[in-house]
Every structure is written in structure tokens, then in C-alpha cells.
Image (tube, grey):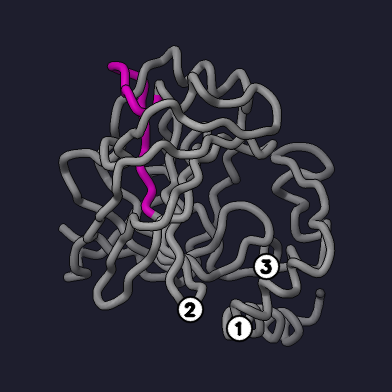
């Protein structure tokens, strides 16, 4: 898609009609993609027409969280319920699928928690520095728009919920049910300072329909559990993307 006008038309259609985009994606199986090599992140946009946003989008994620402007953006009204999540190895990450009933409210919009998953190293960075891992809590509104809460993770003391997830995580593609409920809120740091910006999915199709909220404070998880994750996925983080002219806001 070399014509700039064609690029703008494609992106406008994806953003204006999320349901249409979903229907297009469902027409046939998505091609296999990876983080490195010929099918790696630098080439996602060339693997399939449905991945064009990965190459031509102007609001791609992740980004370096620097130069934020303080603004009154409200808070994060997080109401996640403890539950025995279904833990899935989907070939790209370890993901915990949520049952209905857990929500995030931003302003007047309510989003339902659909799943959370992990990346190593962290996808977002602070002044170019990444942490050991990052958790993404993915929520969807009734209109199909997404809101993601990002939590950066460092090696330190044991985190019981993360340890339970890694203990249950399938070594190959597949799924398993946690033996007991865990509280996803345990992944939230005490301090709730966060960054907000408009961005995209960090995996194909890289749709630019995500309200990103990345917490500034990190949480600690056991180094041994990080190693367990890396044993399955040595690296599953997309390279940093250009911020372009987007507003990066900070609530404090």
C-alpha cells in the first residue's frame, strides 16, 4: 500500500467500523507470525492485507513513555473479581481468560475484562529502559473499542498470583484451569500514577482502537517465575514505535 491516500483510507475504515474489521479478520485464518525473522515484527505489515496497520499506522504501540503532559484524565475505576482463570498457551504468550463480571470504567465508558497476558521484556519503556516483563489487562466496551491497563514487572519477591499462573501454564499450546481463584487486582501497584495515550494492539492486526493506561510504578515477581516464562517465550515484545504527534498524558 504505497499510496498515502490509500493508507489513510484503509486506516479510516478500520477505525470507523470495528465490527467490519472483525468480520474481515474472520474471513480466513490469520497467517502465522513471529517476533523475529522473516515473519517477525518488522515484517508483520507484509504478511497479510489485514495486517496493514502494523506497517502504515500512525498510532502504533508500544512507545517510550517520555515527555508526558500532566492532565486531569480522571482515575482508573478497576473492579476485577477473583476467579479461577483459564490459562492458555496460545503460541505467543501465556494468557489468562476472564469470566464475565470484571470491569474497568474510564469516564462514562465501561469496559469488560476479557483477558490478561504477559510480555518479556516489557513492551513499553521509560526513557528507553524496559523492565523484565509487562502484563496487559485487555478490556472491551460494547462498541468494540478496547482499553488496556499495562503493569510493568521486575524481579524481586514472589508474587503468588503470577506464580500460580506460571505453575499452571501449559508447556505447549493448550489450556488449563487454575485450581483456585486468584485476584487479578494483586497485579496492581499501590501507587496509581499512570500514563494514557491512544494506540494500537501490539500484535497483528495492530488495530488502532486501544486506549492505553500504563501504570508508572512496577510490581515484583519471583525471578524463577520470570525464568519459567522465558523458558516458553524467550522474547515476545514488539519494538518501540514512533510516538508521532500523539498526546502522552500523565494523571499526576
Please name the residue that numbered disc 3 is placed on.
53
Please name the residue that numbered disc 2 is placed on.
143
Q: Nearer the viewer, residue 183 or 50?
A: 183
Q: Is residue 23 above or below residue 100?
A: below
Mark 1 neighbour density, 10 Å: few (under 14) some (14–19) many (20 or more): few
* Distance between the alpha carbons at the discs numbered 2 and 3: 20 Å
Please name the residue that numbered disc 1 is placed on.
17
| Of the two numbered discs 2 and 3 in the rendering, the one whose residue sits closer to the viewer | 2
Mark 3 neighbour density, 10 Å: few (under 14) some (14–19) many (20 or more): many
Q: Residue at x 61, y 34 (%)?
A: 175
Q: Quadrant of residue 83?
A: top left
**Residue 150 covered by magenta stretch:** yes
* Distance between the alpha carbons at the discs numbered 3 and 1: 14 Å
x then y, percent, for residue 62: 50, 52
Q: Residue at x 17, y 70 (%)?
A: 72
Specify which label sits upstream in the sequence, 1 or 2.
Answer: 1
Q: Quadrant of the C terminus?
A: bottom left
Q: Quadrant of residue 224?
A: top left
Q: Nearer the viewer, residue 102 or 15?
A: 102
Q: Residue at x 61, y 18 (%)?
A: 231
Q: Is residue 155 above or below residue 2?
A: above
Magenta span: 149-162
x then y, percent, for residue 2: 81, 75
**Residue 219 covered by magenta stretch:** no
Q: Quadrant of the N terminus?
A: bottom right
Amino acid at each position: 500500500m504505497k499510496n498515502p491516500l490509500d493508507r489513510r483510507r484503509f486506516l479510516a475504515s478500520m477505525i470507523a467500523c470495528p465490527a467490519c474489521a472483525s468480520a474481515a479478520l474472520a474471513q480466513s485464518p490469520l497467517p502465522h507470525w513471529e517476533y523475529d525473522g522473516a515473519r517477525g515484527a518488522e515484517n508483520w505489515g507484509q504478511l497479510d492485507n489485514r495486517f496493514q496497520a502494523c506497517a502504515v499506522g500512525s498510532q502504533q504501540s508500544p512507545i517510550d513513555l517520555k515527555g508526558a503532559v500532566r492532565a486531569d484524565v480522571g482515575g482508573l475505576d478497576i473492579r476485577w473479581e477473583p476467579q479461577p482463570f483459564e490459562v492458555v498457551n496460545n503460541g505467543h504468550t501465556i494468557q489468562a481468560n476472564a469470566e464475565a463480571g470484571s470491569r474497568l470504567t474510564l469516564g462514562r465508558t465501561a469496559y469488560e475484562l476479557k483477558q490478561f497476558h504477559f510480555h518479556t521484556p516489557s513492551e513499553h519503556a521509560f526513557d528507553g529502559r524496559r523492565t523484565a516483563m509487562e502484563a496487559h489487562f485487555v478490556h472491551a466496551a460494547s462498541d468494540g473499542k478496547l482499553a488496556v491497563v499495562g503493569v510493568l514487572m521486575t524481579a524481586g519477591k514472589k508474587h503468588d498470583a503470577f506464580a500460580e499462573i506460571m505453575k499452571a501454564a501449559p508447556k505447549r499450546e493448550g489450556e488449563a484451569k487454575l485450581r483456585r481463584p486468584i485476584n487479578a487486582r494483586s497485579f496492581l501497584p499501590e501507587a496509581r500514577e499512570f500514563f494514557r495515550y491512544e494506540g494500537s494492539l501490539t500484535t497483528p492486526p495492530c488495530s488502532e482502537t486501544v486506549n492505553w493506561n500504563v501504570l508508572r510504578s512496577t510490581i515484583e515477581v519471583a525471578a524463577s517465575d520470570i525464568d519459567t516464562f522465558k523458558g516458553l517465550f524467550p522474547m515476545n515484545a514488539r519494538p518501540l514505535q514512533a510516538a508521532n504527534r500523539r498526546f502522552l498524558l500523565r494523571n499526576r
